[in-house]
Amino acid sequence: MIRVPQVRLVGTDGEPIGVVSSDEARRMAREAELDLVEISPTASPPVCQIMDYGKFKYEQKKKKAESKKRQHNVNVKEVRVRPKTGSHDIAVKVKRAKSFLEAGDKVQLTVLFRGREVVHSNIGIQILGDIAQDLADIAKVERPPRLEGKRMHMILSPSKAPQTKKGEAGRGKSEGNKSGSARSE
């Protein structure tokens, strides 16, 4: 409800009508069988427009949905290995990381150290370097290996746009893990 005595009125097609009384603005909106909507309440006098409010809200909702559709959310997927992980197992994890990168997600590679294994952090750096080299054609190192406590992390990001398959409406969360973060150990 507009309670000010005068408003600056804008017509249905966006052209300014001028400063009129609130009652006159309501009458003009009623004659046009449209709504009187306060656009800028802080202006002096407040700016009101004659429009179909339902149609306006619908168009706003459509614009918001359209802009959301164009966005691409980048998830960070994690692949975990240990210093004693075998070469075949690492190859399987590299293949998994490659699928994440091709889908457009970032991959956080984590080497978990147990007990006194952390003394041999050079093994972790070697493993992460080998994985990064295997994935160099589709990924770039976003954050180099860094030791945090008993974990060493490195983040890879895709070097090109994700490839979407025909008929793929949208990628959901992985079936095995409801949190959206695929972890393998």
Image: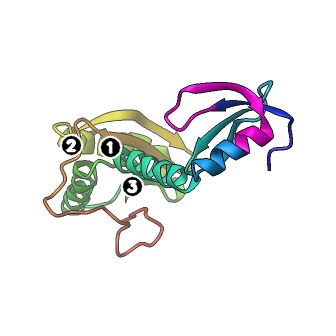
- 105 or 72, which is in the foreground? 72
Which residue does the numbered mark 2 point to in the structure image? 135
Count of numbered marks: 3
Quarter of the picture containing the C terminus is: bottom left
Magenta residue span: 10-26
Vertical side of 27 occupied by 8: above or below:
above
Which residue has dot 3 on it? Answer: 77
**Amino acid at pointer 1:** Leu
Q: Residues within 10 Å of mark 1 (few under 14, many from 20)?
A: many
Classed neighbour count for the residue bearing mark 2: other residues with Cα under 10 Å, few (<14), some (14–19), many (≥20): some
Relative to 98, is 57 on the left or the right?
right
Please say which color scheme the image uses.
Answer: rainbow
Measured Cα–Cα span from mark 3 to mark 1: 15 Å
- Residue behind mark 1: 128
* Image side of residue 147 versus residue 47, left or right: left
Which sits in the foreground, 119 or 178? 178
Kindly indicate the quadrant of the structure image that contains residue 173.
bottom left
Q: Earlier in the sequence, mark 2 or mark 3?
A: 3
Q: Is residue 174 left or right of residue 165?
A: right
- Residue 35 seen in this snapshot: no
Q: Residues within 10 Å of mark 3 (few under 14, many from 20)?
A: many
Magenta stretch: residue 125 in it? no
Mark closer to the observer (2, 3): 3
Tell us which disc is closer to us: 1 or 2: 2
Give the residue displayed 41% in from the left and 72% down from the top.
Answer: 177
Residue 11: horizontal and vertical position, in percent? 57, 34
Can residue 92 be seen in the rendering of this structure?
Answer: yes
Measure the alpha-carbon separation of dots 1 and 2.
11 Å
Question: Disc 3 or 1, which lies upstream in sequence?
Answer: 3
Which secondary structure lies at badge 1? helix
Residue 172, percent from left and from top? 35, 66
Q: CA distance from mark 2 to mark 3?
A: 15 Å
